[in-house]
Image (cartoon, rainbow, N blue to C red):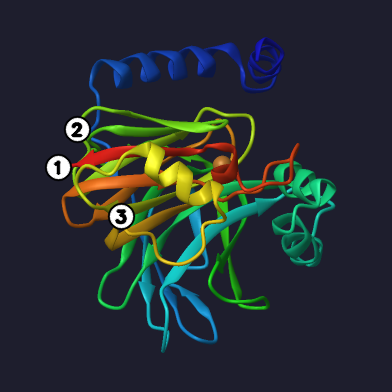
Amino acid sequence: MRHRLIAAGASLGLALMSTQLVASTADAAQPVARAAAPIIKAKVTDKAIKLSTSSIRAGLVTFKAVDKKTKGSAVLQVFHLHPGYTLQDLSADFGPAFSGDTAAIARLDDNVDWLAGAEARANKPGWFQEKLTKGSYVFIDQNQQAPIFSVLTVKGKVVPRQRVATQGTISTFSYGFRTDGTIRANGWVMTRNRADQPHFIVLQHVKAGTTRHQVVKFFKTGGQGRPTWALRGSTSLGVISPNRRAAWHLDLPSGRYALFCFWPDRFSGMPHVAMGMIDMVNLH
Ligand SMILES: [Cu+2]
């Protein structure tokens, strides 16, 4: 930074630099209202993911996932691939990773920035908001096979924008969750991944009084069939990489919920839920 300032001073003249300093001090004294994050609509059909724009300036972006498929829900997922790792590599690694191939899991964990997502059902859009920096971002529907994807180009420096108001947080750890504050069944919640592996979150409505022990037992015995404690109402946040955060909107019946993560573990190859990544939360 110091080097850059010196170089700027030499090329532009010190007088100009000092005017800029005065100007930025004046700006700091009068905080300007931040603009709301722009909304990008992602319409998922049987054949394509249609984004309402193909490029945007860096900063907070709100995504609205809309399900227009003929059947099933859409789970929109956003990610950024590291240089040298392609969509073909990702497609090739996905199946083996979910079958417990730890080398494939490690490649998915290390070569992809997972930027969450949201589930959308017919007439029930999924909403999430996060900060995107310069780069190319790929959108897929977890419930459909490749080659259905779309790309968003994010340009320039991050523009400060107003963050959506959230209530409560759901943090992910290896291997568990922590919930803080009151989480609204119909409202925005913040998620932070505080682990060293990617995670995702499934929220499943359960009968009042269901214990974590009952849910753990179900998955330990193979997780087959419909558990007696399950109720209608569920949603999920897409996969999110370590140290990232995203806000997501819940629109569910109030009540008790189980939290799970099915991301495969890079050490054991098992889905995290099988390693005890299960917790309970009440949505108000
Ligand atoms: Cu996980």
> Label for residue 284?
1
SS for dot 3: loop
Q: Residues within 10 Å of mark 1 (few under 14, many from 20)?
A: some
217, above or below 68, in the image: above
Is label 2 in a helix, a strand or a loop? loop
Between disc 3 and disc 2, the foreground one is 3
Q: Earlier in the sequence, mark 3 or mark 2?
A: 2
Between 60 and 13, the residue placed more toward the observer is: 60
Which residue is the site of mark 2?
182
- The amino acid type, in three-letter code, at marker 1 is His
Amino acid at dot 3: Trp
Amino acid type for the residue under numbered disc 2? Thr
Report how far apart the C-alphas of labels 1 and 2 lie in the structure.
Answer: 7 Å
Q: Distance from label 1 to label 3 (Cα)?
A: 19 Å
| Whether label 1 touches label 2, CB < 8 Å | yes
For the residues labelled 3 and 2, say whether their Cβ atoms are less than 8 Å apart.
Answer: no
* Disc 1 CB within 8 Å of nearest ligand 1 atom: no
- The percent coordinates of residue 185 (x first, y second) are 19, 49
Name the image quarter holding the C terminus.
top left
- Residue 229 shows which numbered tag? 3
Mark 1 or mark 2, earlier in chain: 2
